Image (spheres, rainbow, N blue to C red):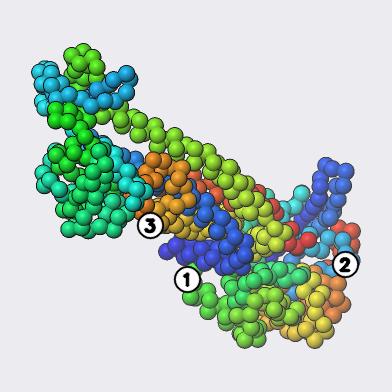
Amino acid sequence: MKWLNRQRALLDFALSSLRRRLGKTLGLALVYTLVVAVLASVMLFAHALRREAALVLAGTPEVLVQRLVAGRHDLIPADHLDAIRGVRGVKSAEGRLWGYLFDPAAAANYTLMVPTDRTIEPGSAVVGSGVADARGVAPGDLMSFRAHDGKLVQFRIQGVVSKESALVTADLFLVSEGDYRRLFGIPEGRFTDIVVTVRNPREVRTVAEKIDAALPDTRIILRDEILRTYESVFDWREGIVLLLLSAAILAFGIFAWEKASGLSAEERREIGILKAVGWETSDVIRLKAFEGMVVSLGAFLGGYLLAYLHVFHWGAALFEPVLKGWAVLYPDFHLTPFVDELQVATLFFFTVFPYTLANVVPIWRAATVDPDQVMR
Amino acid sequence: MIHLSGVKKAFNQGRANEFWALKGIDLEVPAGKVTVFRGPSGSGKTTLLTMVGCLARPTSGRVRLHDRDISALPERFLTDIRRSTFGFVFQNFNLLKGVTALENVMIPAYPLGGDHGALRKRAQDLLERLEMGPKAHSLAEWLSGGEAQRVAIARALVNDPQVVIADEPTANLDSDRSAQFLDIVAEMKGDGRTVLMTSHDPLVAEAGVVDHVVTMRDGVVVEQR
């Protein structure tokens, strides 16, 4: 109880000391909050993007087979399906039809797909939330595009895809196979690529090698490879932002050190008085540690909250162009909120801990002076 | 109660600007009495009080409090003794600016961890007793010299010390305020406390409440009465 009273009294006094130096405290807390907010924004944003990527990959086939002609992706003939199905270890092989369509009305690209898990009536389409927002359409409305031969193809919106992940579904435009072929002029018996499922996940690489040997005009893409590409792209982009930020972090470090450690004559006098009236060196250090903790904890919580709002409510407007890359086609893009405990702990350790230390070390030096100085 | 034998104090020892503020003091300070140290500036009065009040350690010699040698104790123990035995009234009062009179009085008791409400009441009572009740919530920098001194006295008394040490307590006060201060000293003496003061002021040395006058010059005691 005595210990608790003592801490409470010191904390009360620390708060009153901060109030006495309101200008300095607020200035420091403001800069601190902004730095935490920017750092946390990068972390939250990059992490949320990675998570979106993981969601994309969850629905991605283990093995993709594409045909190459002169080193470029070309349509794959249906008879390749039989050849793949004949490879030992292959569970199933399905042809996919997909592509991109530029909509001049919305100045956006849509991902046109023929879904394999649902049937779309000819003349209808199911769209992603981004498409629906960009064109302001709802189920029952009509949308039309020019086909490859210049003729108009019309779709009645059948529904809007529920958004588990905006990144995956926002630009989707799902149509029937017949409509897809008519729009792009792709004949029967040709597919964009082939998805392959494998019986034993540990044999994916072996099966891929067998397909590669059986069909020399194709390239095989594994899910793991896509995952690596996503990871490196996000890491690279996050790295660029962190590099740019490092100058800001360094500046903050110098600023915090100067503000926290630059004891004014008045503060030195106060420490002398406290020691003279019976405070121990450890009491003075604890008082200053409380002051540092109040500022840094407040700034950390405020900064993290600001970062959360920035990333998940305001669309990470500050560094969207750098980190989102190709995803700029969504006019209104919202990431799914996600907070990782380890990440919070890391950020806490790299912001609150150094500041508190920067606060305490010089105080310790000042607090070890003889208390008789106030008598001189 | 307090016994000094062969106490010497050097500043900047071993350097070109070495200075001996005390050159061998032997002194007995009786309990429950008022002792005044007088002498010109630089005679060593204040340095002597810092030795007695556990604010500094002597370079050589011994300081005994209740037969306990306190001259070589580590800082932690000295702080503990200082907190529980001594109350200080500094020459320029040394109140914390931006803090109310009441909180200034409470500050020495914070590290003791007592009940906050009880401490507040004790501080308020002390201020009332020194006729500073109405100013309890005024900031230190708004107080006049006499008011600041009474807050400093209340702060010195908040931990109920046996010994009150006052360094030039009347240096910043007019004659009326100085007389008022001596009345407070008489009250402290009446409470059974030992009071040690340094002063240039003849009004203090000749006051009726003073029991013991020690005259110093150049770091030595030249006269005691």
Answer with the quarter of the image where residue B173 lies: bottom right
For disc 3, the marked residue is: A313
Amino acid type for the residue under numbered disc 1: Asp
A232 horizontally vs A204: left or right: right
Front of the two marks 3 and 1:
3
Mark closer to the chain start, 1 or 2: 2
Amino acid type for the residue under numbered disc 3: His
Mark 3–mark 1 Cα distance, whole angstroms, equals 46 Å
Q: Position of residue B135 (x, y in %)?
A: 64, 83
Q: Which residue appears at 47% of the width and 55% of the height?
A: A303
Q: Nearer the viewer, residue A157 or A314?
A: A157
Residues under numbered marks 3 and 1 in contact, where contact means CB atoms less than 8 Å apart: no
A87 horizontally vs A147: left or right: left
Amino acid type for the residue under numbered disc 2: Gly
For disc 2, the marked residue is: B39
Quarter of the picture containing the N terminus of chain A is: bottom left
For disc 1, the marked residue is: B115
Front of the two marks 1 and 2:
1
Residues under numbered marks 1 and 2 in contact, where contact means CB atoms less than 8 Å apart: no
- Disc 1, SS: loop
Question: Vertical placement of A335 versus B98: above or below?
Answer: above
Label 2 and label 3 in one chain: no
Front of the two marks 2 and 3:
3
Callout 2 environment at 10 Å: few (<14), some (14 to 19), or many (20+)? Answer: many
Q: Which residue appears at 70% of the width and 62% of the height?
A: A266
